[in-house]
Image (cartoon, helix red, strand yellow):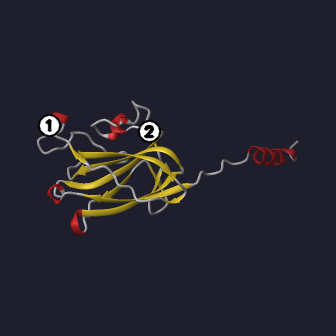
Amino acid sequence: MKACAPWLALALTAACGLEEPRPSGRLGFDLLVDRAVSDKVASLQVAVLAHVKDCSVVGRDCLAAQVAPQKLELETLTDASGRGHKALTFPLALGDGGFQSFAVAGIRAGRDYAVVIEALTRDSPPNLYGSSCTILPEVTAGANKPLVATPVSRFSPTDGGTDAGATACDPRLEP
């Protein structure tokens, strides 16, 4: 019986097989940021939600506060070191004309994604200065066309923000 155990384990592994990883895509961004807010915003947090066809599911609040209650499914994004994260954060580093370019990788090839970009304040812990949600109908394996994201909307006091425009919540999906 002891001689059969390793063979049985090997046969079960071969019969069931290991799950094949789904192909993943890379998505580039060019984001325009008004220099007037650059002194208030420290970084941009990018998250990708799966199975979303309408950005209305993402309210005017921190995405971190909405994921569990609304059962939103976050895609795992890959950083430059190959590690997976719920969101990637990019320090605000504006180039000529107020543009910043960055890319995310590791999005599973598929359909119906929403890309959420949140502007995080310089506070500690940071607050949410504004956000953007853009529907991404499809991601293919490999490089995809750069996304033209909807502008990041600043929050006003009537939206639950402060006079400075920030919403008092810690938006980080990974502190």
Q: Amino acid at mark 1?
A: Pro
Q: Residue at x 27, y 50 (%)?
A: 151
Point 17% across, 60% down: residue: 35
Secondary structure category for the residue under label 2: loop
Earlier along the polypeptide chain: callout 2 or callout 1?
A: 2
Q: Which mark is residue 96?
A: none
Does residue 126 appear anywhere in the picture? no
Query: Total of numbered circles in the picture?
Result: 2
SS for dot 1: helix
For the point 81% across and 46% down, the residue is: 11
Residue 24 visible, this orientation: yes
Lateral position of residue 6 relative to residue 34, left or right = right
Q: In the drawing, what numbered circle is on residue 157?
A: 1
Please report the residue visible at 34 percent of the width from the left and 35 percent of the height from the top: 56
Q: Where is residue 172 drawn, in percent x and y? A: 33, 46
**10 Å crowding of disc 1: few (<14), some (14-19), many (20+):** few
Residue 159 in the figure: left or right of residue 150 = left
Residue found at the very far left of the displayed protein: 163
CA distance for labels 2 and 1: 28 Å
- Where 64 sits versus 26, above or below? above
- The image quadrant that residue 64 belongs to is top left
Q: Position of residue 126 (x, y in %)?
A: 24, 48
Q: Which residue is mark 2?
A: 52
